[in-house]
Amino acid sequence: MRATGEKIKSNKISVVNDFETREHPNLLKRYQLIGLVMLIIVISLVGYGVYRYKLRSFVAGNIAEHLPLSPNRPPQELTSFPIRYAGNDLTPRALAYLHDTLFVAFVEQPIVQLYDSDLALLATWRLQRPDTLIPTQIAVTDSFFVASDTTHNLIGIYDHEGFYVASVAWYPERSARVNPAQISVDSRQITVVDDAMNQVASISLLNDAPFFKFLELLRVTPSPFKPDEARLSCAWFAPDSNLWLGTSNGKAVMLSLTSGAVNNLDRPSLSQISDPIQFVDVNHAIRSNRYPNPKPIPRVHMLDRVSGKVFVYDLSGKLTLVYPQDRGLEQPLAIAVNQEKRHIYIAESGRSAITVFGF
């Protein structure tokens, strides 16, 4: 009996060993394959996290080189630059450019970021004076950085280090606040579109002008349209002293400040002007080795929020081209120009990115 029991036990062990011999290699290969797949997934997730949180801005910030284009050719798209700060994707709201520095404000953020011409981050400002200011529009001159906040009806003036200088919120009679829906600047003044008053306010930026000891209202230009006919959305003073105006229902006109005449800008035959929100002057004739003695050819680029297009005019108001031609910009909010490198920056809120065009 004992011998029989040992034989049965030996047979069981033999069967188990035969099973392991046949199946174990397959199981081992299966486990190795599963482990390899899991390792690849983990490495991919870690790599994506490092790219998303640390490297994405630097990778996206490389701007391709391009040859200067003639004025009758549309700017070409070079790159799209997403912005991430403190672990969050930021949506660009307003842009300004001066002296190799791109200034960027963001939707619902009390900060402004500064980038060099290659889109490397230089600094981050927190605008906490005169109050926490969330910029909806920004502009910059040789002396000042200007930010407006439509929530508080406030315009803040800062130096180029981000330190607060002064602010304005009221008209001189102090009976109404300025509602800065859109601003632009030159070396002498701030041009403010007040959509509540449906007028354009010009405010002095001269150092010796009082503003409540600093800023002084120079003039108020009423809209040439009735409030129920058209609401002003953007304005720009041209070098010939004409005032360019855009309205929220798709009108784009030149207003003569001397005669009061209103001339419509050319309208495109294919794209629809729906909601112009900003004008910017772009001079295609940049001095370079390629163009040693250029004749200035000013071009005014008008950004339209709804159509997602930029309409380009000469100073007579004649439409010369429309871009981008292969797509519509996704909810564009702002445009700025780097004249030296021939770059145009456009804030696309629909893509949460700054798109760069070369001209």
Image: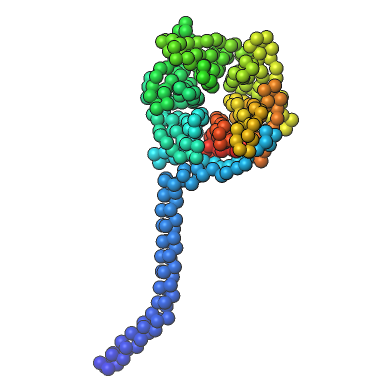
- Whether residue 56 is visible here, answered yes or no, is yes
Question: Taking 239 as reference, is 54 above or below it?
Answer: below
Specify the quadrant of the image occupied by residue 300. Answer: top right
Locate the C terminus by quadrant: top right
- Whether residue 245 is visible here, answered yes or no, is no
* Residue 330 percent location from the top left of the image: 58, 36
Q: Nearer the viewer, residue 205 or 321?
A: 205
* Residue 259 percent location from the top left of the image: 67, 9
Q: Nearer the viewer, residue 18 or 322?
A: 322
Give the left or right position of residue 175, taking residue 17 as reference. Answer: right
Question: Taking 82 as reference, is 231 above or below it?
Answer: above
* Residue 220 percent location from the top left of the image: 56, 10
Q: Nearer the viewer, residue 269 or 4?
A: 269
Q: For the point 38% across and 22% down, which residue is it?
A: 164
* Residue 253 percent location from the top left of the image: 67, 19
Locate the N terminus by quadrant: bottom left
